[in-house]
Amino acid sequence: MAAQSFDLIVIGAGPGGYVAAIRGAQLGLRTAVVEREHLGGICLNWGCIPTKALLRSSEVFHLMERAKEFGLSADKIGYDLDAVVKRSRGVAKQLASGVGHLLKKNKVTVVMGEATIPAKGKVSVKTDKGTEELTAKNIILATGARARELPGLEADGDLVWTYKHALQPPRMPKKLLVIGSGAIGIEFASFYNTLGADTTVVEVMDRVLPVEDAEISAFAKKAFVKQGMKIMEKSMVKQLDRGKGKVTAHIETGGKVEKLEFDTVISAVGIVGNVENLGLEALGVKIDRSHVVTDEFCRTGVDGLYAIGDIAGAPWLAHKASHEGVMVAELIAGKHAHPVKPESIAGCTYCHPQVASVGYTEAKARELGHEVKVGRFPFIGNGKAIALGEPEGMIKTVFDAKTGELLGAHMVGAEVTELIQGYVVGRQLETTEEDLMNTVFPHPTLSEMMHESVLDAYGRVIHM
């Protein structure tokens, strides 16, 4: 069979790949996307979307338990874990099918199968019906990543879970150990803890949510502990002894090993890029710690070969992948493409309370040599937060003292994953403190705290 010829081939149909394919097609490129498993990738099927559906269920459950605070009554509050999971899977399925519709609408050729790149400009796809050969001047790698597994801590789907097992649990954990307190680990810890699991989180770094600003991490930790979680920082799980219906974890803290028993373990110790079996090494692609090395325009150094999203390294975020996909498609089509700036991409963690940030932490800003002005404002000082029954939280802003540049913004509390975009736009537009102080924020809203935090940095805060 003769090889099918395209202008652009995208390998991987996750949030980076399918967006790149659609944008390429919109710009007149004859485009194909190759996917080995599910349209929508990990994000839509096993990551961002289904976890948010689970967390919404636990959030509603938590609110029902607080009904009396709002003058309401709710008797015999409970949950059906199977029904919660079924809803989550339904949401994921709906969105994944939507991706198929969008690709078809934009006339993108979809090839389901396992791709390799035998030579520059060529893609070989092993499908159910045999092998299909594709050619294109431009190829985008968007193969994503998978859960990292440490020796001795490998998942078995029964006692030890990855995020995939945690999304379709065989049972409700009674005593749960979560290894790792990044976004994935702390979100699952929050979900299962809210539904009643006795939850312990072990973090090897000196604080939970270690990529966040230190103050925000400390505030979040206090909230987690108040909710009943046990947090073990500067700790490492050295060994898991698996028995019948139980796991004994050997946890080292300060040189001392403690043995604790659990019925379920969730391992969330990072991710590994899907770089294997693609033929990248033979092409001369440079790989560093399972991630493809690229320049600011996602070029690999091999003519016509690009890498976007998780396979191209941190930050490992769906919205970063999507934006890179658009940028590369526009670059290929001869448009004036703008590189993605990692320091202007927001990170969001959907635990309770939510955590969100963009830009530099206070410590990083100082490390980079900035003289800084820092503002803070607590949720307890905001009328909308009190009316919502969500008075716990804070917003922190970091400015360059000389130029007024917004260097970073950090939040913990209700709905901060929605609020953060205001500061993202501010950074994109190179907003100064004066612009933000002269902006009128609507009342009563949670967003007023963003304004007050800026005012606080310059000694002008009103409501504190």
Image: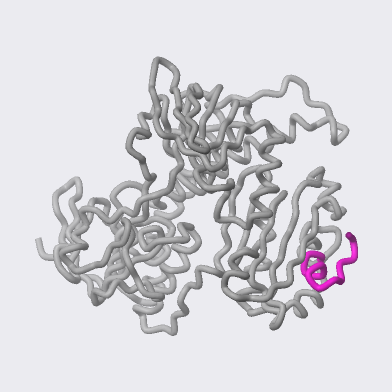
Q: Is residue 243 above or below residue 61?
A: above
Q: Any magenta on residue 460? A: yes
Q: Indicate the position of residue 50 as horizontal and vertical percent values.
A: 51, 43
Query: Residue furthest toward the top?
Result: 244
Which one is in front, 410 or 364? 364
Q: Is residue 306 visible?
A: yes
Query: In the image shown, does 253 or 237 lie closer to the viewer?
Result: 253
Stretch of the chain drawn in magenta = 452-464
Residue 285 point in image, percent of width and height: 24, 67
At x 29%, y 71%, the residue is 300
Residue at position x 38%, y 79% in the image? 331
For this view, does 128 lie left or right of residue 153?
Answer: left
Q: Which quadrant of the rendered structure holds the C terminus? A: bottom right
Instruction: State which quadrant residue 153 falls in.
Output: top left
Q: Residue furthest front?
A: 255
Residue 169 against residue 2 in the figure, above or below: above
Residue at image location 37% in from the left, 74% down from the top: 295
Between 123 and 234, the residue placed more toward the observer is 234
Determine whether, in the image, residue 293 is placed left or right of residue 370.
left
* Residue 175 on the magenta segment: no
Residue 109, visible in the rendered structure: no
Left or right position of 178 against 428: left
Query: Is 15 on the left-hand or right-hand side of 29?
Result: right
The mark tally for this picture is: 0
- Residue 114 is situated, as x and y percent measured from the top left of the image, at 23, 51
Residue at position x 67%, y 46% in the image:
220
Instruction: Work out which residue is located at the far left of the displayed protein and give it.
Output: 1
The quarter of the rendered structure image containing the N terminus is: bottom left
Residue 190 picture location, percent across and down: 61, 38
